Every structure is written in C-alpha cells, then in structure tokens.
Amino acid sequence: MDTRLDKIQAVVSGQGQRITNLKSNAEAVCGQLEQLEATCSSLQEDNKSLKSKLSDLEGRSRRQNVIGDQVLPSPSELDRAHHTLAPKPGPRERPRPVIIRFHRYQIKDLIMREARKQGEREYHGHKLRFYEDYSEEVLKQRAEYKGVMAELYQCGLRPSLLFPAKLRITLQSSERTWLRSVSEASNYISTLGVSP
C-alpha cells in the first residue's frame, strides 16, 4: 500500500512540476505577446503617419498640375505638358486628357478660378474641362464626401472641398463652417433637421 502511495505521490509531484513549467512558459509567452502587440501598435501608428505624409507630399508635388481635355492654344510659363498614357482616341471619341505642369502654382490657381467662372468653353469643337491633378489617395478621400455634398446642396448650402479633403460649408449668411470628416458632415446635416 505504501509503495502505491509513493508511486501516486511521485506521479502527482511530477505533474505539479510540469504544471509549474507550463505556467512559467505561458507567462513568458504572454510577456512576449504583449511586447509584440505594443510594437505592432506603434508600427501601425507610424505607418498611418507615413501614409499621411506621403499623400501630402504627392499632393504638393501635383499642386501645379492641371488636367485638361485639350491642349491650350498659348501655354505660358509651363514646365511640361503631355497626354495621359491612354490609347489614341478615334476621330469621334473624346480626346485624351492633357496634364499640364505650370511653373508657378499661382498661374494654375488663376486658370482654375477663371475656368470655374466662365463655365464650359470650346476649342476646335471640343469642350474644355479643367481638373486638379490629385493623387489616388486624395481622390479616394474626396470621393467619400460626394453623398454629403449632394445633401448639403439640397439644403441650399454651398459646400466646397479644400485640399486634401476638408469640407467647407458657406452658409446663407456668408458664414463658413469647416468639417474634417464625412461623419462630422453627416452629423451637421442631421442638426439642420432637413431630410434629403
């Protein structure tokens, strides 16, 4: 009987030792996991910051660019102008867009302002349209505002998007409100009490 108890006690103490080892291993793994989670969180923040900086730098490098549907008759102070990399259109198709980089962004701003004021223009039977040249990331950010901007127009307000994607609303009293996100804009619309 004593030998049986000794064997059982030896088995129990062996199991106790294994449990102690497993416990210490689990604590070590838990510590490493916490360390990895902290590192991952830090890297995610760095990645988000770097993406934001990259988008800003790409947007600033395109600041002097304009995309038009036709070549301007007398370009002045241009660094370069070229067609986009699309196949050459047929005779009845829309012409390829032209990307124009102005030497000074003030000239580009002036042309964009005048194009908005004058509305649609034609050159050799083709409509001229001018667009800002934004990076893909900025275009995605700006596209998110499409729905809320339509709702704001329906409410009789004058929304506009500032670079990169900040919504400015001009009220009927000529006061201006700035909103930094689509959710903020949606909340603002709900406070107006107008349903689209």
Image: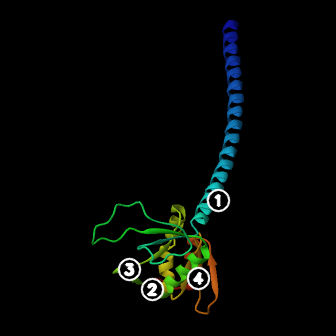
User: In the figure, 21 relative to 49: above or below?
Assistant: above
Distance, label 2 to label 4, CA atoms, is 21 Å
How many numbered discs? 4
The x, y position of residue 172, in whole percent, is 58, 92
Residue with the mark numbered 2? 119
Dividing the picture into quarters, in which one does residue 11 lie?
Answer: top right
Classify 10 Å Cα crowding around label 2: few (below 14), some (14-19), many (20 and above): few
Residues under labels 3 and 2: Cα distance? 10 Å
First in sequence: mark 3 vs mark 1: 1
Q: Do the residues labelled 1 and 4 touch (CB within 8 Å)?
A: no
Tag 2 secondary structure: loop
User: What element does badge 1 sit on?
Assistant: helix
Amino acid type, mark 3: Lys
Q: Which of marks 1 and 2 is nearer the N terminus?
A: 1
Q: Which colour scheme is used?
A: rainbow
Residue at 45 percent of width and 85 percent of height: 119
Residue placed under numbered mark 4 in the picture: 169
In front: label 1 or label 4: 1
Amino acid of disc 2: Gly
Q: Residues within 10 Å of mark 3 (few under 14, many from 20)?
A: some
Secondary structure beneath disc 3?
strand
Give the residue number, with chain letter if any, for mark 1.
Answer: 53
Does any portion of residue 189 appear in the rendered image? no
Name the mark nearer the viewer: 3 or 2: 3
Counting residues from the N terminus, which is met first, the one under dot 1 or under dot 4? 1
Q: Which mark is residue 127?
A: 3
Residue at the bottom extreme of this rendering: 173
Measured in 3D between alpha carbons, the distance from the residue under mark 3 to the one under mark 1, in whole angstroms, is: 36 Å
State yes or no: discs 3 and 1 in contact (Cβ < 8 Å): no
> Rounded to the nearest whole Å, what is the CA distance between mark 1 and mark 4?
26 Å
Q: Residues within 10 Å of mark 4 (few under 14, many from 20)?
A: many
In terms of secondary structure, where does tag 4 sit? strand
